Amino acid sequence: MKMKRKRHRGQRRRQRLRRRQQQEEQQEQQQQQQQQQQQQQQQQQQQQQQQQQQQQQQQQQQQQQQQQQCQQCQQCQQLQQQEQQQQQQQQQRRRRNNRRSRRSRKSKKSRRNRRTRNTRRRRRRNNE
């Protein structure tokens, strides 16, 4: 009877040892899994940050493009205004020139007319 008890004690010890080892192994596995999960989370966070940075860069590029387009538009408008001003100036010059030429023609005509009148008068007087 005593021998049987001893056997049981030995078996129980072995079982306890096995259980402890199994528990320790399970704990190690759980710790490893947790570490892996943490690493994965960190990687995901890094990826998200990179994506955000890329989005910000894209937004900046879009803003720059819009600004460039705006500048081009402004330049075009300025050019158009300059052309309009030039055209207006040309028109004003033409009008002035036309007025001058008319005046000069009129004055020439009036001179001619005076001369012819004067000569006619002289001839008449002379004839008389």
Image (cartoon, rainbow, N blue to C red):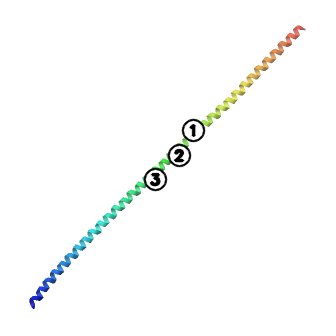
Report the Cα–Cα distance between label 2 and label 1. 14 Å
Name the residue beneath numbered marker 2: 70
Q: Position of residue 26 (x, y in %)?
A: 24, 73
At label 3, which amino acid type do we have? Gln
Tag of residue 79? 1
The secondary element bearing badge 1 is classed as helix
For the C terminus, give its image quadrant.
Answer: top right
Q: Residues within 10 Å of mark 3 (few under 14, many from 20)?
A: few
Query: Residue farthest to the bottom?
Result: 1
Q: Quadrant of residue 18?
A: bottom left
Residue at (31%, 66%) from the top-left corner? Answer: 38
Is residue 62 positioned above or below 118 on the image?
Answer: below
Q: Quadrant of residue 56?
A: bottom left
Q: Position of residue 86 (x, y in %)?
A: 62, 34
Report the Cα–Cα distance between label 1 and label 3. 30 Å
Name the residue beneath numbered marker 3: 59
Is residue 91 positioned above or below 71 on the image?
Answer: above
Front-most of residues 117 and 8: 8
Q: Pointers 2 and 3 in contact (CB under 8 A)?
A: no
